[in-house]
Amino acid sequence: MGMPRMTLQTQLVLRALLEAPAKQRYGLELCELAGLPSGTIYPILARLEQVGWLDSSWEDPTVHEAAGRPRRRFYRITQNGAEQARDALARAYRSRKQPLPGWAAAHPAAGGGAS
Amino acid sequence: MKGQRRVIVPSPTAQTDLTPTLENVIAAVRSHHSDADAGLLERAYAEASIWHTGQRRHSGDPYITHCLAVAAIVADLRMPLPVVCAALLHDVDDTACPPQRIADQFGKEVADLIAAVRTAVVSAYPQAGRGTAPRSAAACPSREMAVLAIRLADRLHNMRTIAFVAPAKQLLKARETLDVFAPVASAAGLETVGRELQDLASAVLQPAPSSYAVSGWLLTALTLLLPSGHRARWQEEWSADLAAYATRRARTRFTLRVLLGAPRLSMTLRSPFCRERR
């Protein structure tokens, strides 16, 4: 329940958010920061928000009205989210290293452990 | 259960994002008329909720959200309590509500207002250019002014949510809004309403480059894949991001990728942990 799936894309998004955890970012901006193709980020954001790692809010009307464009939805990583994201990223990093190439071939029955 | 970690705390802005609540409406009325009877508003809200049960807006939102939104706009225009009640109840005549009931429950003034709102011809009001209309609507607006405020608020909320209406009807409504409602609002001294109506209508009638309209329309259609309570938010979020692209190609690419991600987004939003966030 409390954990999003740590896909590569999710990891990229979290990394981008953690670069400046206090900063509010909108979807498109995050997409670019994370190096993801445009438009692919929304399911990830929704999921992260759902588990409480992100908070979102609408842009201040004075800002977007002055800029003459529609209001944006801003996301920010929560404190709890930042902690958990760091943990999860570290775990994902370790697990990626785990099945060493030679090891997996030598013990086919144990292959994987990937989740 | 308790010790672990904090999960899903609704942010303070989560509620006010999309639709005003009854509390917002009461607060708005009270801020201009401190002695207003909140009980009456609560009863009007309950009454409207009953008759609009099961009805939906084009966006998929429950119909009552429209009643609340209109009431909130009217309250922000400093209209007194009976006018805000009439705004909450302005569409019950279209429901199974017996004709005499509103007069019995809320008095003749409210019932008359609702009847007048239905029959009012907005184009008959003075339009911008000649400023003979009553300026401020404050404490004791004329009945005409009250009726106009409800009609304008009704149109304003319909224009704010027009993305969900069929394209041909959008154009018709936008044209009428631009030609009639916006000038009447400005002439009545309701400049903010007039300006917003004008902006919303213009956006429908002259969307920037041609493919912007197509992508925007497709994005709106995509929101239909999402659970109803979430559509307005994502539609708005996507359009804002879409608007940042300068080329037609980039916009098309963006839209297609949103399309590819929509099933997953929809699944996420439908999962049981998503209840509290909108």
Image (cartoon, grey):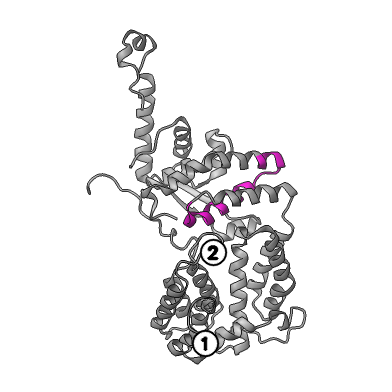
Q: Which mark is residue B111?
A: 1
Instruction: Depth check: give the residue in front, B265 or B244.
Output: B265
Callout 2 touching callout 1 (CB < 8 Å)? no
Residue where numbered disc 2 is placed: B57
Instruction: Depth check: give the residue in front, B192 or B250.
Output: B250
Residue B40 seen anywhere in this rendered image of the structure? yes
Q: Mark 1: give few (<14), some (14-19) or many (20+) Cα within 10 Å.
A: many
Q: State the residue at coordinates (66%, 42%).
A: B251
* Mark 1, secondary structure of its residue: helix
- Image coordinates of residue B47 in percent, x first then y, are 43, 78
* Mark 2, secondary structure of its residue: loop
Q: CA distance from mark 2 to mark 1?
A: 24 Å
Asked if marks 2 and 1 fall on the same chain, the answer is: yes
Q: Earlier in the sequence, mark 2 or mark 1?
A: 2
Left or right: A2 as drawn, with respect to B196: left
Q: Is residue B108 above or below residue B67?
A: below
Image quadrant occupied by the N terminus of chain A: top left
Q: Is residue B50 above or below residue B256?
A: below
Whether residue B234 is in magenta: the answer is yes
Dividing the picture into quadrants, the one containing residue A88 is top left
- Image coordinates of residue B66 in percent, x first then y, are 52, 69
Q: Chain of mark 2?
A: B
Residue A22 seen anywhere in this rendered image of the structure? no
Q: Chain of mark 1?
A: B
The magenta region covers: B227-252
Q: Mark 2: give few (<14), some (14-19) or many (20+) Cα within 10 Å.
A: some
Instruction: Depth check: give the residue in front, B118 or B248.
Output: B118
| Kind of residue at badge 2 | Arg
